[in-house]
């Protein structure tokens, strides 16, 4: 069953089209993450579903019913937005309890419901405080707790962990999916953090310029990005992108990096001589000895330890920069000349003119530009 359907939604502000003929289905019990840069239209889309603003064109169906012209309070939706929107005259407890109070739940049910989400979000010690006495992180968690407390069938969450400290944000990435699953809610979750999107989403809808550019599971988005722009949004450090022109010899199709031939097994013949961009994840590059077949000569420019990993900036013979990522504690050169190994099977190939995917990593499967 589909809980939420958006059909050909258009939203304009004067001459600016914020959402452009956007359609989307969210299944019952699914957590769909809207991911993309600031200005992509994610929050506007959430506000349209909530009924806070109206579309200029298109329809919004919730549970199969047309809710396009239905007021927000009659849509049965739980919401937590970036601006908190807490009642300033009410304590955190009463703010969280407000959806339960509105449905005339018993005192026992209110106490249990508030206590459960407050403990999970680690705000049970500030329930007696009013919003002015709360930090921004506590306000954001209070707003999230209020949205969760009523166990609504459809939950809209607009970057609810943005003001939460790093430790709690990490914990919430683990705990929040379990809580949402236990409630059976259908969730539309907005974030600009790709790790959050990967951790929380059953599917991810990547947005840009008012359109959905790709939608799929976290694995599909990461391993088969539809284009160069999407590939660049997922990964830390970001993917390496080099202009190449594939060639072919008796051993098959290859590209040259530092004057060394890097084979691209399974590549279609029609890419030979075509202007392309090769995408190489930093974790797919390893340091090697010069005696290893296919070792690519580079110069190590800098090394940066990042807790669980070490990122190294290297430069090819043609002065093109690459980032290499390896687990912390793994030995590697700190400076000077060295060699790397690139497995052609783990690379992406994109069409340079359109940016579209030709072949995804780890397979011989071709993309839309093949």
Image: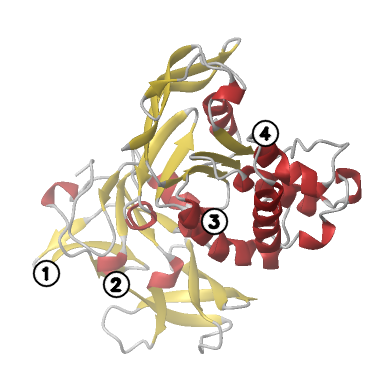
User: Toward which corner of the image does residue 255 lie, by quadrant?
Assistant: bottom left
Q: Residue at x 65, y 50 (%)?
A: 109
Check residue 343 in the rendering and tell me which mark sits there, or answer none: 2
Earlier residue among tags 1 and 3: 3
Q: Residue at x 65, y 59 (%)?
A: 116
Earlier residue among tags 2 and 3: 3
What residue is shown with label 1?
251
The residues bearing labels 4 and 3 have C-alpha atoms spaced at a distance of 32 Å
Q: Residue at x 64, y 42 (%)?
A: 105
Check residue 196 in the rendering and tell me which mark sits there, or answer none: 3
Circle 1 or circle 3, nearest the eye: 3
Circle 4 or circle 3, nearest the eye: 4
Circle 2 or circle 3, nearest the eye: 3
User: Toward which corner of the image does residue 214 lie, by quadrant?
Assistant: top left
The residues bearing labels 4 and 2 have C-alpha atoms spaced at a distance of 59 Å
The residues bearing labels 1 and 4 have C-alpha atoms spaced at a distance of 71 Å
Q: How is the image coloured?
A: secondary structure
Check residue 102 in the rendering and tell me which mark sits there, or answer none: 4
Helix, strand or loop under label 1: loop
Helix, strand or loop under label 2: loop
Residue in the foreground of this view, choosing between 82 and 35: 82
**Left or right: 68 as drawn, with respect to 93:** left
The residues bearing labels 1 and 3 have C-alpha atoms spaced at a distance of 42 Å
The reply to whether the C-beta atoms of the residues labelled 1 and 4 are less than 8 Å apart is: no
Residue in the foreground of this view, choosing between 334 and 132: 132
């Amino acid at each position: 069953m589909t809980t939420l359907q958006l059909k050909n939604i258009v939203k304009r502000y004067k001459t600016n089209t914020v959402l452009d003929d956007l359609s989307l289905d969210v299944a019952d019990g699914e957590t769909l993450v809207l991911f993309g840069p600031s200005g992509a239209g994610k929050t506007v889309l959430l506000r349209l579903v909530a009924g806070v603003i109206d579309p200029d064109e298109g329809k919004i169906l919730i549970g199969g019913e047309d809710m396009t012209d239905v007021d927000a309070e009659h849509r049965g939706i739980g919401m937590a937005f970036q601006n908190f929107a807490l009642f300033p005259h009410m304590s955190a407890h009463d703010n969280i309890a407000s959806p339960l109070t509105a449905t005339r739940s018993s005192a026992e049910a209110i106490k249990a419901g508030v206590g459960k989400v407050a403990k999970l979000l680690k705000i049970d010690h500030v329930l007696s405080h009013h919003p002015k006495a709360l930090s921004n992180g506590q306000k954001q968690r209070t707003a999230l707790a209020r949205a969760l407390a009523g166990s609504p069938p459809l939950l809209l969450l607009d970057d609810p962990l943005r003001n939460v400290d790093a430790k709690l944000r990490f914990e919430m990435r683990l705990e929040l999916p379990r809580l949402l699953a236990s409630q059976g809610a259908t969730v539309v979750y907005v974030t600009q953090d790709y790790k959050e999107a990967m951790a929380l989403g059953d599917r991810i809808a990547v947005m840009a310029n008012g359109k959905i550019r790709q939608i799929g599971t976290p694995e599909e988005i990461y391993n088969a990005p539809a284009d160069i722009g999407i590939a660049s949004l997922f990964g830390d450090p970001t993917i390496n992108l080099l202009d190449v022109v594939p060639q072919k010899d008796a051993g098959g199709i290859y590209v040259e990096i530092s004057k060394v031939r890097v084979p691209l097994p399974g590549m279609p013949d029609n890419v030979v001589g075509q202007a392309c961009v090769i995408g190489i994840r930093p974790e797919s590059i390893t340091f090697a000895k010069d005696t290893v077949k296919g070792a690519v000569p580079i110069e190590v420019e800098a090394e940066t330890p990042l807790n669980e990993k070490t990122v190294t900036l290297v430069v090819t013979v043609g002065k093109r920069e690459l980032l290499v990522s390896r687990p912390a504690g793994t030995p590697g050169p700190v400076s000077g000349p060295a060699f790397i190994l690139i497995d052609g099977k783990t690379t992406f190939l994109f069409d340079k003119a359109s940016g579209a995917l030709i072949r995804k990593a780890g397979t011989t499967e071709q993309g839309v530009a093949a």
